[in-house]
Amino acid sequence: MFKFDFDIEDEDGISDTSSQPVQPTAESDRDERPFVEHSLAKMIENLADEISYSSVQAGGLCIPRRDLFDVRMQLISAEGGRPNEAVDAQTAIDFIERPSDLVPRVYEGGLKTWECSIDLAAYLAREGYDARGKRVLELGCGTSMPTLALLYHLFNQPPLADDGPITTIHLQDYNASVLEYVTLPNIVLAWFFSSAGQKFRSTLPPPPPKDPIKRMSKLQLDSVPEEDEETDARLDVPAMDVSCHVVDPSIPGDLSISLELRAAFLASLKALKIDIRLFSGPWSQFRSRISTPYDLVLTSETIYQPASLRSLVQLLRDGSGSGDCLVAAKLVYFGVGGGILEFQRTLGEVDFNGRAETVWEHKEGVGRVYVRMMAVKDLEKLYSR
């Protein structure tokens, strides 16, 4: 095995799946949903009118992400909406408030930020991975931290010429509500705080300073221990400079999702030639829809459940082809059965024509790693150097 000696600090309060039990589901409760592609324009249209955000640090990047308490407030308000929307909202609320975050085939924990997703985002940031003109897939994306690390670079590039290459980014999560409530809002936040969003930001009045007392009361009421909102509540919130249009993503705040912002976001994607597509449903139904392999496939905290490992590994194999595939995970998920050893065993069972190499390992506490799946062509390149 080879290893890169990166020193990545633990993020306080990030959700940890290693010791959390996965709730068993009776056959009657199982809900293997159909695989669906969602219209980006429609999801943009359905975004909340305002979102609250804070940030996490990953490999030197400050990544803004929607606050979990804000998601919960939107879910509560959605209960009185359309029948299907109300059912999905109540399901998500139920699982946010449960001691366990994971119920197989019902809710896979995507509303929260998980530890290994920060690890993988940090790795991509430190490596300076350039996704321009590439095809990228993130499976079990949830809050999409790894993809946000890639978008940070893409959103800070100048617009491309008409004949420039298209960057394709596909994001999949089991639950459509996760894509709507956290994945897409986080992408919008990444754009807003980037060079691509600067022109739109310049049209806005300076943001008001966040009231730390008001924020604290919200957090005390709605905080979930696995996320880091409680840590935010204890920190002194610095005063925001309201004299200019410079906005600091490290300072918690609220963002108004106006019609103008939605239009500017979509226009930026077009100018930068970034094609974002969103999918929900099980991995087993995704494989048949892959017509062209991806240059980079990412997944984090998805190998905890042995029952779903085979379909995941088959999708990773078929989706990556001869491209890169990075898997970030705990060494073992206690009480569940999944982990790196089970993952490697499954690789052998699905006739993966290559091997897996550990490229980073964190040994303190519950071990965490990311593994690169290397196809035969990759191995030939590696050993010909």
Image: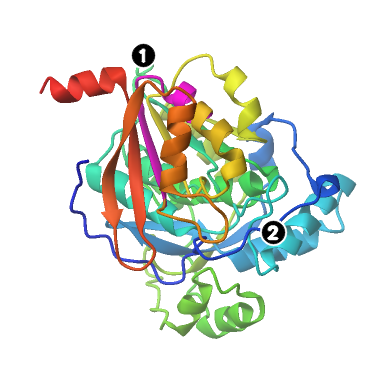
Q: Residue furthest left?
A: 385
Nearer-N-terminus badge (1/2): 2
Eyeballing the image, is 87 above or below 289? below
Highlighted magenta segment, given as a residue range = 315-329
Check if residue 324 falls in the magenta segment. Answer: yes
Classify the position of the N terminus by image quarter.
top left
Q: Amino acid at mark 1?
A: Asp
Residue pictured at 37% horizontal, 20% vertical: 353
Q: Nearer the viewer, mark 1 or mark 2?
A: 2
Look at label 2 and name its amino acid.
Answer: Gln
Please report the residue visible at 42 percent of the width from the left and 82 percent of the height from the top. 235
Q: 384 or 171, which lies in front? A: 384
Give the image location of residue 362, x and y in percent. 29, 58
Estimate the x, y position of residue 310 in percent, counting from the top left: 55, 33
Label 2 crowd (10 A; few <14 / some 14-19 / many >=20) = some
Q: Is residue 126 left or right of residue 246?
A: left
Q: Secondary structure at mark 2?
A: loop
Q: Residue at x 78, y 45 (%)?
A: 30
Where residue 252 appears, as percent x and y from the top left, is 47, 69
Count of marks placed on residues: 2
In the image, residue 48 sits, relative to residue 298, either above or below, namely: below
Horizontal relation, residue 204 to residue 44: left or right:
left
Spatial separation of the CA atoms under disc 1 and disc 2: 50 Å
In the depicted view, which residue is nearer to us: 132 or 267?
132
Name the disc covering residue 23, or none.
2
SS label for mark 1: loop
Asked whether, in this view, residue 267 is left or right of residue 363, the answer is right
Badge 1: few (under 14), some or many (20 or more) residues near its Cα, within 10 Å?
Answer: few
Q: Is residue 146 magenta?
A: no
Q: Which numbered tag is attached to residue 163?
A: 1
* 16 relative to 304, above or below: below
**Residue 274 visible in image:** no
